[in-house]
Image (cartoon, rainbow, N blue to C red):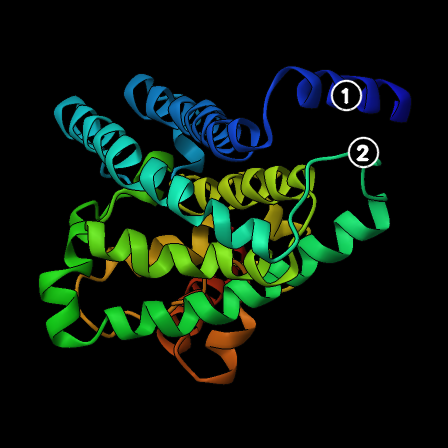
Amino acid sequence: MASFLESSWQYLITNFSDFQLSCLGSFIVHESVFFLSGLPFVLLERLGYFSKYKIQAKTNTPEAQVKCILRLLLYHFCINLPVILLSYPVFIFMGMRSTLPLPSWKEVVSQIIFYFILEDFVFYWGHRILHTKWLYQHVHSVHHEYATPFGLTSEYAHPAEILFLGFATIIGPAITGPHLLTLWLWISVRLLETVEAHCGYHFPWSPSNFIPLYGGSDFHDYHHRLLYTKSGNYSSTFVHMDWIFGTDNGYRKLKALKTIEAEAESKKM
């Protein structure tokens, strides 16, 4: 496996420049992972499959789904791509490389864990600031146009928010200067996480059922259902920041109430 990966990477760095791989390669990785993981939830909602696992009964219209996709493509090419191109010198200055040898898996895993923890911390405070009255009304309300989220709505936002909260995703790699492969893996797992959090379904195999402190779709869906500035559940990935600062109290009370109701129903049966 390592030999195959190294030979594949050798092909890439032989046939493409560092700039091409770092900028265009990163953009292609982003678009591929994002749409391949997010589009299936559009189909699930349209076709009504797995409806028993859908968190909200309400569904989005085909017109609303198309609007989201078209806006995303516009922002990806007009905002995300230019930002990637402009940030390239910063990443190179901080030590990012694309050469062989490839980093060890221990290095990759440790860096990605660090990125998740740092991103979650920065995202929590940035997201919480966006829920102050003025910023919510003029910026963050765009993201909340979809009270019933589906996977692709994870990146549907005001341009200012894309830049503001996007900082949380790139700050880790920017300060550590990782190998390009590590950056691509980080982009991929972060996208899979945010698409899952916005997917609108809570399956028996959802990560939150197995990973401690992971928020997931049920945790974040609650945030989208409440269309006002103090909805809580501000974290991107984990739940500890909301628990520490008490911004998940409404969600916890709702979960406790549902547990009591479920227990009452089981006793009746």
Compared to 94, does 39 lie above or below?
Answer: above
Q: Position of residue 180 (x, y in %)?
A: 65, 39
Q: Residue furthest bottom?
A: 245
Numbered label attached to residue 127: none
Displayed quadrant of residue 166 = bottom left
How busy is the neighbourhood of tag 2: few (under 14 within 10 Å), some, or many (20 plus)?
few
| Residue 170 picture location, percent across and down | 49, 55
Q: Quadrant of residue 184?
A: top right
> Is residue 107 left or right of 256 when viewed as pictured?
right
> In the image, residue 183 lies at what x, y percent?
61, 43
Residue displayed at 19% across by 33% down: 71
Q: Secondary structure at mark 2?
A: loop
Q: Is residue 46 above or below residue 106?
A: above
Residue 262 seen anywhere in this rendered image of the structure? no
Which residue shows up at 52% across the image and 83% down it?
244
Q: Which amino acid, mark 2? A: Leu
In this view, 87 is above or below 152: below
Could you tell me the amino acid type at mark 1?
Gln
Label 2 sits on residue: 100
Distance of mark 2 from mark 1, alpha carbons? 7 Å
Along the line of sight, the residue nearer the viewer: 134 or 206: 134
SS category of the residue bearing label 1: helix
Upstream in sequence: badge 2 or badge 1 = 1
Residue 261 in view: yes
Task: Tell me whether circle 2 and circle 1 mark residues in contact (CB < 8 Å).
Answer: yes
Quadrant occupied by the N terminus: top right
- Residue wearing tag 1: 10
